[in-house]
Every structure is written in C-alpha cells, then in structure tokens.
Image (spheres, rainbow, N blue to C red):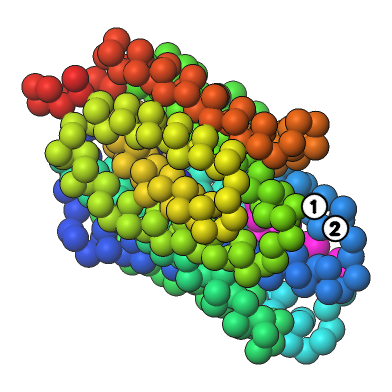
Amino acid sequence: MRRAPATGAAGGRPAPSAPARDLRLLWWANSTDALGTQVSGLVLPLLLLGLGHSPALVGAVAGVSTALGLLLGPFAAVLADRGARRRVMVRSAAVSAAALGSLAAALALDVLHPAHLFAAVLVERVATSCQEAASRGTVALLCPPEGLPGAVSRLQAGEQGALVLGPLLGGLLYQCSRWLPFLADALSYLVAALCVRGMRSDLAPEPAGGRAAPPSRARWSALASETGAGLALALRSPVLRLVLVWTAAANGLLVALHYTAVFALQEDGRGPAALGLVFSFAGAAGLAGALAAPAAVRRLTAARTLVAVSWLLVPAAAGLAAGGGPWLYGLLFGAVSLLVPAAVVVLHTRALRVTPPALQARTGTALAGAAGGAAALAPLAAGAAGAGAGTAAAVAGCAALLGLLAAGTTLAVARGALRVPGDRVGEAA
C-alpha cells in the first residue's frame, strides 16, 4: 500500500498535542505496512505469470482491484470523519492480513486454487484502500501545527526506505519460497493494526455541534451523499486546489517519465540490472530528499521551496530526452527524487492546516484519488506517446508540461495560494 500523507486539521479544533510515543507508533504502522506492500507487490505479478496466467489477466486483476478501491475508499473516509477512524484502520488491516495469510498458507501447502488467489488479492487491495482512506488525517490529530513538516517528512522517509528495501527483500524471500513474501506482508498488516490499536490519543475529530454517531447500515444511502464533501472543499480552497493540481500533474508526469525511461532502456537492449540500478538510485535519493526536506523548507520558506522545486524539475526531465544510458538516467531520476519530497512536505503541511477536522479523511481521499488517477493513466499515455512519436519526443513533452506546471505554480503562489491562517511574516511570501 502506497500511503500518501494525510490531510486534516486546523479549523474548528486545534490538533491536540500527543505523546511522542503515538507519533512513533504511526511511523511504525506506516513504514512497516509500506515495506510489506513493496515486498509482496514485486512478486505478485511473478506468481501470477508463473502459474500460467496471461499478462492481460494480471493487468485486469490490478485494474479491477484498483477500481473497487477507488469506489469504496470514499465511504471509509466518511466513516473515519464520523469517528470510526481507529476501527476502520484496525479492521481493514486485519482483513488484509487474513487475506494474505490465507494465500501464504495455501501456497505453502500447495493447495492454492485460482479462485482463492484472485479473491485474496481483491480483498486485500480493497481493504487496503479503505485503510488508506481512513488513515488520512491521523498525523494532524497527533501533532501540533508547528511539528507537521517534520512529521510529514518522517512519514515520507519511512515510505522511501520501504521503496528501496522492499523489492530487494521481496526478491530474496521469493527465491527462498514463493509463499514467504505474502506471509511477510500479512505480518506487516498485523503490526500496523497493533500500532494503531495501541495509540492513546483520540483519533476521532470533534465536528461542530458534537461528535456524530457512527452510521448504521440503514444510513448507507445518506452516507453516499457525503462522500463528495472533501472534493468540494478542495475545489473551493485556493490552498487545496493548488495541492490537488500540483500533486496530480506532477505525479502523472513523473510516472510517465518512469515508464518512458523503461521503454528507452529496453530499446537500447538494457536488461533488468540496468533498470534496477536506475530506480534503486532514485529510491535512495528520494529517502535523502525526505530527510532533508524540513531543513530546506525552513531555510527557503514554503513558497520559495515549492517554486524552486517546480522549476528545477524541468531541466532534470528535459535531460532524459538526451538519452545516454542507465548512468545518466539514474543521475537525473535521482535528482528528481531528491527534489520532490520538499514540495510534498510544503503542500501536505499546508493542506493539513486548512482542512477542518471533520473533513480530514474525505479531503485526503479526494486529493490522493486525483494523484492516483493521474498515475494510473500515465503508463497508457507514455506508451501511446512513445509508440507514436518516439521516447525522446515523449520525454520532451513531459518536460514541457512540467514547465507549464512550474509557471502556473509560480503565478498561484504570487497570488497567495499558499497562505494559511497563522503564517509568520514572509513564511508563504
């Protein structure tokens, strides 16, 4: 499960200070969960292909599970905003653990039926989407506003570390036995559930007029009408609009660059080792960028950091059009991965500060859905552009669109789109 920093917190009720222990538990929950997902995510396609299923079926399973998650995630976000955040997170993680645990047991006993395999994958992906939706906003409930940049950065660093270590660990476990990666992911869900269960802080926001009772089954029709509230808020708020547009556009374009680089390296006859070198280096650079992001934001201010990152992404992307083999690709993707975390810290910290407590999960789900949708469409666009105009032209097009994004970001920041209540003088100037 790829987890985006949660959105939530500054209207209606200030985010309560929580013991450092709870923030550590949140970090362990996110990082362990992300590591387990990377471990099993690498080997699941290998397992499906090894069992004789076609690449088309593998893609269909991924697409259906993603679509179901997008449909059910907003309902889980409503439940979280109504006070059931902890229950949804814990129970969703437990369901995911049970699904993958049953898959690992069937593989170990060599009694796996195809229906069992596909059902376990779909259940785990849907439960994970619900867990992600409910988790958005948690960091704002555990951390005071002044500590949000550091907290968001540490969560990012945990995810980047999982991105570096997870595929390597997954490959090693799969070589030992094909059921071990799925057992590891199931255990990671259990660890995440126990960490969330062990938090002492109140994870339920206090909406105006008193806390609403969790909805019953009879209220599902009314529940459906509330799922769009987060997106509506994002479209009204200048800060959240900027977050939505920047993250969706940057996410989609960077994923398109990723796939275009894969196509280019394959055209040059490069094997998996070259691809691994490029993206392992990029993952390590992303980890370094996440760790350095809070200091960079403090030194440059939020507005200057976002504008600088937006413009620096353009030459890094344009350099990929020149080709040059895996070393140049690794260097340029490393530069991109080093830069992006600082922008993410700025944007998500701003979003955390302007979203009311009772809309945390729904707003976070809307923002993450836009970014995820762009990322899902990006490989198709990259493949079509590469086939029609060539990989160099596709990369140049991505760089040009990043330039437009940088120009739009500069204009939006100049108009005050990053300003939030409580800013110090010059902080968002």
Q: Report x, y in % for residue 108.
A: 73, 87
Along the viewing direction, whichever of 29 and 288 lies nearer the viewer: 288
Q: Going 32% across and 27% down the picture, which residue do you hit? A: 307
Along the viewing direction, whichever of 334 and 25 lies nearer the viewer: 334
Q: Is residue 355 left or right of residue 3?
A: left
Asked if 206 appears above or below 166 in the picture, the reply is above
Q: Going 61% across and 65% down the picture, which residue do you hit? A: 274
Along the viewing direction, whichever of 294 and 128 lies nearer the viewer: 294
Element under disc 2:
helix
Q: Report x, y in % for residue 291.
A: 28, 55
Q: Is residue 97 left or right of residue 243?
A: right
Residue 283 drawn in magenta: no
Disc 1 to disc 2: CB gap under 8 Å: yes
**Residue 73 seen from this side:** no
Residue 121 drawn in magenta: yes
Number of other residues with Cα within 10 Å of mark 2, as a class: few under 14, some 14 to 19, many 20 or more = few
**3D distance between C-alphas at marks 1 and 2:** 6 Å
Asked if 156 appears above or below 409 in the picture, the reply is below
Q: Which mark is residue 59?
A: 1
